[in-house]
Image (cartoon, rainbow, N blue to C red):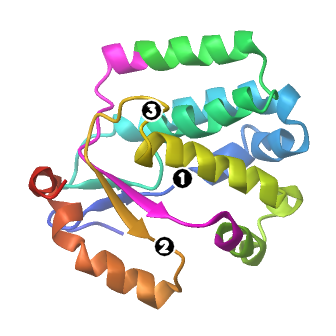
């Protein structure tokens, strides 16, 4: 399907790649044993997110479900803080991330934070029925939520280098469509956000 040049290009998480790396489901392996497979999955996620960031622009706006930044500041950070990633793995991933930031344009113009409670995320996860996620406890989602709050609301994790638009997302799909439509101009023209924040 071709996108009109006036429509944003939407890049979803490349989950299918993470589930099949030449026959290996490293997403599933990580959920089974994060201490063993966290570095493997996060290395590959960093690569696949980098691929999305550097794709040629084919429309004026590119929207990414997640980014190389959320991979680092949320998921790598959470693995390390939870004691499931050794410091040496964390340091190696962090050095790779820093090198990428310093040598490749992975900047973003706007982060839209769909702020959702861990309980609602847990219900959605169960409804989604992704095989690998069946073993995820609510406590994991609470920890992930805490990392997002530290990063995008409290700014205690690191400096956020672009505006953040926070949209409460504990709603059904119809209400979320309406809420996103309300913010359409801000999302599609983030330069206007400077005046709103």
Q: Is residue 118 magenta?
A: yes
Q: Is residue 130 above or below residue 177?
A: above
Would residue 155 be found to the left or right of residue 103 on screen? right
Q: Secondary structure at mark 2?
A: loop
Q: Which mark is residue 169?
A: 2
Would residue 169 be found to the left or right of residue 182 on screen? right
Disc 3 crowd rating (10 Å Cα; few below 14, some 14-19, many 20+) is: some
Task: Specify which label sits upstream in the sequence, 3 or 2.
Answer: 3
Q: Position of residue 95 (x, y in %)?
A: 53, 11
Would residue 35 be found to the left or right of residue 65 on screen? right
Task: Specify which label sits upstream in the sequence, 2 or 1.
Answer: 1
Q: Secondary structure at mark 3?
A: helix
Would residue 162 be found to the left or right of residue 41 on screen? left
Segment tinted magenta in the rendering:
100-120
Could one spot residue 136 in this view of the protein?
yes
Question: Which residue is at 83% across, 56% downward?
Answer: 136
Q: Between tags 3 and 2, which lies in front? A: 2
Q: Is residue 52 magenta?
A: no
Q: Are marks 3 and 1 in contact (CB under 8 Å)?
A: no
Q: Which mark is residue 13?
A: 1
Q: Is residue 135 above or below residue 171?
A: above
Could one spot residue 60 in this view of the protein?
no
Q: Tell which residue pokes out farthest to the bottom in this image.
A: 174
Residue that mark 3 sits on: 50
Question: Which residue is at 62% across, 11% downward?
Answer: 92
Q: Which of 8/113 is in front?
A: 113
Q: Are marks 3 and 2 in contact (CB under 8 Å)?
A: no
- Residue 186 quadrant: bottom left
Mark 3 to mark 1 CA distance (whole Å): 12 Å
């Amino acid at each position: 399907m071709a996108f009109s040049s006036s429509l944003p290009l939407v890049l979803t998480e490349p989950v299918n790649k993470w589930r099949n790396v030449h026959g290996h489901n490293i997403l599933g392996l990580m959920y089974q044993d994060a201490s063993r497979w966290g570095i493997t999955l996060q290395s590959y996620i960093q690569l696949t997110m980098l691929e999305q960031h550097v794709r040629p622009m084919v429309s004026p706006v590119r929207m990414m479900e997640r980014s190389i930044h959320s991979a680092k500041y949320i998921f790598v950070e959470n693995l390390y803080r939870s004691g499931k990633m050794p410091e040496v793995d964390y340091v190696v991933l962090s050095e790779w991330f820093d090198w990428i930031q310093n040598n490749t344009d992975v900047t973003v113009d706007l982060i839209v934070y769909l702020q959702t409670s861990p309980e609602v995320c847990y219900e959605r996860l169960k409804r989604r029925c992704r095989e690998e996620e069946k073993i995820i406890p609510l406590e994991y989602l609470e920890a992930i939520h805490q990392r997002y709050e530290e990063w995008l609301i409290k700014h205690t994790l690191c400096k956020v280098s672009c505006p953040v638009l926070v949209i409460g997302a504990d709603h059904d799909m119809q209400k979320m469509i309406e809420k996103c439509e309300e913010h359409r101009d801000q999302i599609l023209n983030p330069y206007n956000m400077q005046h709103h924040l």
